[in-house]
């Protein structure tokens, strides 16, 4: 019998969330973003599940793209950060990856590399994020050069929304306006909407959408924001009770004695800790689901274990199931208690947690 820490991946739910993004985009091109191992869900497994539905995929780098190709994925894959060194460019051409182009150094490398098959280039416009991309004036100056390159087959204009998860921010409108202006000048297809754009900014919908976190059942917005869409839970992180202690007032629980019982309590120890990816900073009171009922964390999360309040739960014994997040405990709620976001929860689940896939 092995340690019970398991992440159940609900593949049908990922498909439902992709269909929602496609529906909101009115059937236009929709990339399934599967970077970072599909946000911790398993890139190859997710990509194969979506293979009959996704128009294309998006990853951060060539290593992630090659992994998908080697697993049998044949559809287009966009490299969101493009290439880093010249030796990647022939591989990008060979596998017909779509490739972001975001700086002069990349443009120079591409111009120096002869290719038998030209690339589909996604030209990155910096509209205010200031991570990657050319300014509008730089693109206007360089676009004739780009179109003359034999290494370039076609161009899509793209940018990235910085504040789309803040519904009152004026920055989103400014970014969209700048992209539209350049899009019209150059008469290019475009892509701007991430998950927050898809869900809450209809004016960001373009030829291609790039949903990420929404595919994995988590909202990109603060918990207080409500939207007219339902996202389906895609990951259930679970384990079980491995020890039970009956404690008295004044007894403390865990490292640092941060929880001290103020009444007789029953406390269960769960095989799950920060080495599994559960956030160490999840504090006392963070919800968990124990044997069909809500409970809460008491005491600090340690490397391999955490402790939960099971006072009054005579039905809970060794081996009782515990859901850390999933269908009963929203990952966003856990993230809020830990001072983080669901992205870090999903991508932080470590290799020693078994993954079990369900269609």
Image (cartoon, helix red, strand yellow):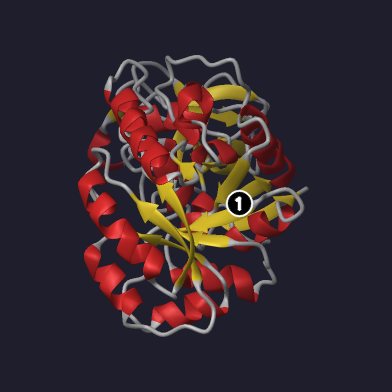
Residue 114 to residue 57: above or below? below
Horizontally, is 138 left or right of 23 in the view?
left
Residue in the image at 57% along x and 71% along y? 96
Give x and y (percent) for residue 335: 40, 33
Residue 239 to residue 249: above or below? below
Give x and y (percent) for residue 286: 42, 27
Front-most of residues 309 and 57: 57
Q: Which residue is mark 1?
A: 6
Give x and y (percent) for residue 158: 41, 46
Q: On the image, which quarter does residue 230 sit in?
A: top right
Give x and y (percent) for residue 135: 22, 47
Horizontally, is 261 left or right of 320 in the view?
left
Specify whether residue 55 is in view: yes
Residue in the image at 51% along x and 23% along y? 202
* Image quadrant occupied by the N terminus: bottom right
Asked which secondary structure carries label 1, the reply is: strand
Specify whether residue 283 is in view: no
Horizontally, is 36 left or right of 124 in the view?
right
């Amino acid at each position: 019998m092995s340690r019970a820490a398991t992440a159940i991946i609900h593949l049908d739910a990922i498909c439902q969330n992709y269909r929602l993004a496609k529906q909101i985009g009115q059937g236009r091109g929709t990339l399934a973003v599967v970077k970072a191992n599909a946000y911790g869900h398993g890139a190859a497994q997710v990509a194969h599940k979506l293979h009959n539905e996704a128009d294309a995929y998006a990853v951060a780098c060539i290593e992630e793209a090659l992994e998908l190709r080697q697993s049998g994925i044949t559809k287009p894959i966009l490299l969101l950060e493009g290439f880093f060194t010249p030796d990647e460019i022939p591989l990008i051409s060979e596998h017909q990856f779509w490739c972001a182009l975001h700086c002069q150094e990349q443009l120079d490398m591409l111009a120096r590399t002869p290719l038998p098959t030209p690339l589909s280039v996604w030209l990155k416009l910096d509209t205010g994020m200031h991570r990657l991309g050319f300014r509008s004036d730089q693109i206007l100056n360089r676009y004739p050069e780009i179109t003359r390159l034999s290494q370039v087959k076609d161009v899509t204009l793209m940018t990235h929304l910085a504040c789309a998860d803040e519904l009152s921010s004026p920055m989103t409108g400014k970014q969209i306006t700048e992209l539209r202006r350049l899009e019209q000048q150059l008469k290019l297809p475009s892509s701007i909407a991430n998950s927050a754009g898809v869900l809450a900014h209809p004016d960001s919908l373009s030829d291609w959408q790039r949903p990420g976190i929404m595919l994995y059942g988590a909202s990109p917005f603060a918990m207080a924001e409500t939207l007219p869409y339902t996202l389906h839970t895609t990951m259930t992180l679970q384990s079980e009770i491995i020890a039970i202690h009956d404690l008295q007032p004044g007894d403390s629980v865990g490292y640092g004695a941060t929880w001290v019982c103020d009444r007789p309590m029953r406390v269960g120890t769960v095989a799950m800790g920060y080495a599994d990816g559960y956030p160490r900073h999840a504090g006392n009171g963070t919800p968990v689901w124990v044997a069909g009922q809500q409970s809460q964390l008491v005491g600090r999360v340690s490397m391999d274990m955490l402790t939960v309040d099971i006072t009054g739960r005579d039905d809970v014994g060794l081996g009782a199931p515990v859901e850390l997040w999933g269908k009963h405990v929203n990952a966003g709620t856990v993230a809020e208690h830990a001072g983080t976001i669901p992205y870090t929860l999903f991508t932080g689940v470590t290799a020693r947690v078994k993954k079990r896939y369900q269609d």
